[in-house]
């Protein structure tokens, strides 16, 4: 499985990436924590599109007040905002 998202940050194909995706559910917020590898980088309309293969994932119930970085991506130690395309 994988994801495609847009960012303003430069990312490189082949690099490792960690990201989280937050979901609303009837029982509260769920956070899908993923690690993977960047497999595609596209530049279009001033945005950078990134395709990533998910290698590991873990679904967790979000604990409010812990300062989660849901909706962020980290490439080799750099955290950036992201929007996941569906």
Image (spheres, grey):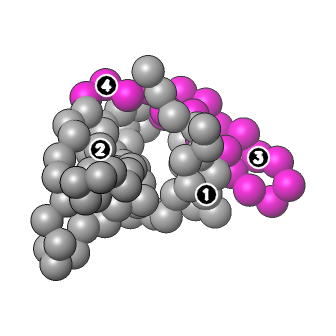
**Circle 4 is placed at which residue position?**
55
Q: Nearer the viewer, residue 73 or 84?
A: 84
Left or right of 2, for residue 49: right
Mark nearer the N terminus (1 vs 2):
1
Quadrant location, the C terminus? top right
Assess whether mark 4 and mark 2 are in contact (beta carbons under 8 angstroms): no
In the image, 68 versus 37, the foreground residue is 68
Residue farthest along the front direction in this orientation:
26
Report the Cα–Cα distance between label 3 and label 2. Answer: 26 Å
Would you name the residue on which mark 3 appears?
A: 43
Main structural element of the magenta stretch: helix, strand or loop?
strand
- Occupied quadrant, residue 79: bottom left
Determine whether, in the image, residue 6 is placed left or right of residue 17: right
Give the mark nearer the N terminus: 4 vs 1. 1
CA distance separating discs 1 and 3: 10 Å
Residue that lies at the very extreme toward the top in this rendered image: 1
Q: Position of residue 41 (x, y in %)?
A: 64, 38
Name the secondary structure under disc 1.
strand
Q: Earlier in the sequence, mark 3 or mark 2?
A: 2
Q: Which residues are magenta?
A: 38-56
- SS category of the residue bearing label 2: strand
Q: Which residue is mark 1?
A: 7
Residue receiving disc 2 = 32
């Amino acid at each position: 499985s994988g994801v495609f998202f847009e960012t303003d940050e430069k990312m490189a194909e082949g690099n490792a990436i960690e990201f989280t995706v937050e979901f609303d559910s009837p029982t509260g917020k769920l956070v899908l924590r993923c690690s993977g590898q960047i497999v595609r980088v596209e530049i279009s309309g001033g945005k950078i599109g990134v395709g990533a293969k998910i290698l590991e994932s873990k679904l967790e119930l979000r604990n409010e007040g812990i300062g989660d970085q849901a909706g962020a991506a980290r490439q080799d130690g750099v955290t950036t905002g992201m929007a996941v395309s569906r």
